[in-house]
Amino acid sequence: MKTYLQPEFAVLRDDYRCIRCGVCVGQCSYETHYYDEEEDVVRSREENCVGCQRCAVFCPTRALTIRTNPYEPRPNSNWRREHLSDLTRQAESGGMILTGMGNDKPFRIYWDHLLLNASQVTNPSIDPLREPMELRTYLGRKPDRVEVQGRSVRPVGSPLVTVEAPVLFSAMSYGAISFNVAQALMMAASDFGTLCNTGEGGWPKSLRKYRDNVIVQVASGRFGVDADYLNEARIIEIKIGQGAKPGIGGHLPGEKVVPLVAETRMIPVGTDALSPAPQHDIYSIEDLAMLIYALKEATNYEKPVGVKIAAVHNAAAIASGIARAGADIIVLDGLRGGTGAAPKVIRDNVGIPIELALAQVDERLRREGIRQQVSVLVAGGFRQSSDVIKAIALGADAVYIGTAAFVSIGCTLCQKCYTGKCPWGITTNQPHLVKRVNPEIAAERLSNLLHAWSHEIKEMLGGMGINSIESLRGNRPHLRGVGLENWELEVLGVKGAGI
Ligand code: SF4
Ligand code: SF4
């Protein structure tokens, strides 16, 4: 069938600069470029290009420019270019449209409409370069009491896990991401003193040495879950939902299930790894409580157990139930959260922004007097350190980052992770692409990112006259909204600027 689709991107090659080195031919995993020997010229099949920019970055003479195809359909306010091309793709394939990464629709990003306070005259600012500034964060149920014996003070109650700053690497499963990236994330978490989440794909044995910095997931597929997996981790997280695709399961195509992925997930090589939409043993809060306590029992009550849900309309009521079910941590994943693969229709239309869910969850847990029973972790499109500090002021204990971590190691948000051909070597298991990420170098970049954000968070805290991140948690008077409707300010629980 002849396709009626126009290429999404235009590949512009400056023939004067092109030295026919063929670097672009080797770099593009979508076979866009090819060398025409007869004419001694490099040509491009534009219809293959996904706009990942890899060839443009690696071209030694900067001869390539990748642009959105300037082709414009006839203007129509209802039927925009995206609608036309989605309709055409479905008419030609008969299938659901898949995508990767997070929701890219122009929903309001509330972080950009919240402003932070700063000290003036009274309660002076603190200089973080000269005075101690504490970003250390404790995850888990806060102790009910402490026991004092001489000079030693021992908290009594559930175990707490400490991270050096309130930023963790979110759940990204080996199989969906390459081994080298999984390793780099764990190395960076270990170097910096934070935690990295295995996601639902199991935990390769050779990466168990990073056990002090690893959270393991128990998802509906139970991939790789056994007693060692649970006992070697710092925290266990039950995955109920994911922000990028609330209400549906996961699917790792058989092509990505190479021998080590198969061994780690405990499934045959080359078979599709399907995670059902629901956990088949959880149909009520009581069922969830049973799983939480089964996991605590299996780990001798030494590990905090968290529960991850997608941010949906009634997130606050669900979070209250999770806290009462005995979880130590609640993870809220918002609508801009990334994923390796999701149906586009779900990614773009289901869930709510993380800012609104967080504000409501924190408020409800406080109102019910159970906020101290759980830590609240939030995920879903955190782009910069100011987003993190605003989330803490809105009530989060810490933030998970995934997409930002990927960008720091090369990802250009081309959204084609589900193809398994990531040209940046991140979401792929093809050996020649996996090698594009050197774990040591990637870990250094990730660690640099965490250090840079920590410096910035300290600077912002100092400006507010606060010397500890704990003092900012849920401290909404430090936030003011701009350009927001009254109902939005009410949901966020912040005043408008100038009040
Ligand atoms: S897919 Fe990436 S590497 Fe290939 S031509 Fe397009 S921008 Fe270049
Ligand atoms: S991880 Fe790779 S495939 Fe996915 S969006 Fe980033 S560059 Fe594209």
Image (tube, rainbow, N blue to C red):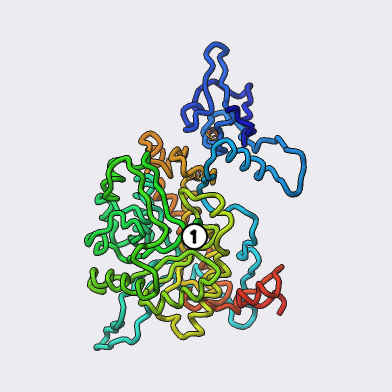
Residue shown at 57%/22% (left/top)?
43
Quadrant the N terminus occupies: top right
Where's residue 122, x and y in %? 62, 83
Seen at 55% across and 75% down, the residue is 360
Q: Secondary structure at mark 1?
A: loop
Where's ligand 1: which quadrant? Answer: top right
Nearest the viewer among 341 and 451 is 341
Of residues 102 and 470, the one nearer the viewer is 102
Answer with left or right where residue 301 lies relative to residue 15: left
| Res 127 visible | no
Residue picked out by circle 1? 246
Residue 33, image x, y percentages: 53, 26
Q: Is residue 66 left or right of residue 249?
A: right
Q: Residue at x 47, y 44 (%)?
A: 417
Q: Is residue 222 above or below residue 373?
A: above
Q: Does residue 123 appear to the left or right of 145 in the view shown?
A: right
Q: Nearer the viewer, residue 337 or 396?
A: 337
Q: Residues within 10 Å of mark 1 (few under 14, many from 20)?
A: many
Which residue is rendered at x = 62% and y = 27% of the image?
13
Q: Is residue 145 above or below residue 294?
A: below
Residue 11 percent location from the top left of the image:
61, 30
Examine the rendered structure and indicate whether residue 251 appears above or below residue 94: below
Q: For this rendering, which residue is in front, 298 or 284?
A: 284
